[in-house]
Amino acid sequence: MAGYAKTPNNWQSVPVVALDDDNFWIVGGREERKVFRDEDLKPDEKGKVIINIEYLDLKFFYPNVDLPKEFEMPADILAARKEKRKLNALAKDAIYTRPDYKNPDAGKVHFYIEGDKLRIYNQGNQKEATADKIETKYGQKAVKVEALEIGHPYLQLPPEVAEPFERILKEKELKKLALVLKGKSVLDGKKYYGFNMEIPAGEWGLVKDYLEDFGAYDEILNGWLTCEPGQVGAILGGIPINACP
C-alpha cells in the first residue's frame, strides 16, 4: 500500500497501491483505476501534492456519502519512495555494494568503475572519492580515499572490486607498451628491440619464443630483446615500434 484517501466522515478509505518504486494506482468503483508516476506529481503553492479522484466513481461503493473529490498524497510516503528509487539506482550502476563496516546502520558503500578510475560513494555520509591506482598497504590492496571522511586515509578493496579495477589499470598501462630500438649486435649485425616497460605474464607467454636474453653485461644490449619487432608487435596487437636508438 502506498497510501490512502479518507472520506470526510473518516470511516472508509480509498486504496493507493504501489505497483513498483516509480508508479502507483488508486482504486475506484466498477474497477476504475488510474496509474500515477511519482516523478510526475508536483506540489502546489502550499507544498502539498493533491490528486483529483472524482473520476473514480466512488459513489458505486458509497452512494449516500459525501465523498471527497481529491486527496493529499502523504509527503512522507513520497519521500520514502524517492529515497528507495535513489538507492536502487545506486545499487544498479555499482559493480559492487557492501555495508559500511564502520557504521553498518548508516548505509552502504557503492563502488563504480568510470573509464579508468574507481569511484567510491559512502551512502552513510554521502561522501565520495575517486582513485586512479591501487596501492598495497600491509599486504592488502587498497585505494586512497581521504575525501570519504571515514577516519582513515585508505580503504581496503574487496576482491569483487580489486580484480576488475586491476584489469582496467593493466589495459590502460598496456596502451603505453612499445618496442624501442636498443642497438645493433656486433656479432650478427642485427638490430635488437626491447620493451619500454614490464609486460604481464600473459603477454610475455605469447612472444617469449621471439625474445633472447642478453644478460646484464653489455651496456647497450641487455635483458630480453628481439630482432623480430614486427612479429612481436603484431602478436601484441600492433604496439608501436620506435626505431630511434
Image (spheres, rainbow, N blue to C red):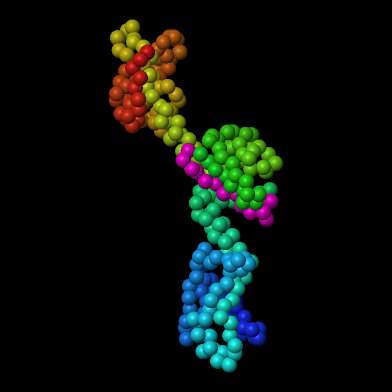
On-image quarter of the C terminus: top left
Identify whether 7 is placed above or below 2: below
Residue 132: % across, % down: 53, 35
* Magenta run includes residue 156: no
User: Position of 108 compared to 239: left or right?
Assistant: right
Which residue: 53% across, 76% down? 52
Locate residue 236: give its quadrant.
top left
Residue 213: % across, % down: 40, 17
Identify whether 190 is placed above or below 23: above
Q: How many marks?
A: 0
Residue 31: % across, % down: 47, 83
* Magenta run includes residue 114: yes
Which residue: 56% across, 81% down? 69
Residue 202: % across, % down: 41, 33
Task: Work out whether residue 106 can be spotted.
Answer: yes
Which region is colored magenta? 103-116
Which residue: 59% across, 88% down? 66
Residue sitting at the far bottom: 64
Which residue: 54% across, 53% down? 90
Residue sitting at the far front: 45
User: Position of 208 compared to 40: left or right?
Assistant: left
Q: Nearer the viewer, residue 162 or 115?
A: 115
Identify whether 200 is placed above or below 220: below
Task: Work out whether residue 211 can be spotted.
Answer: no
On-image quarter of the N terminus: bottom right
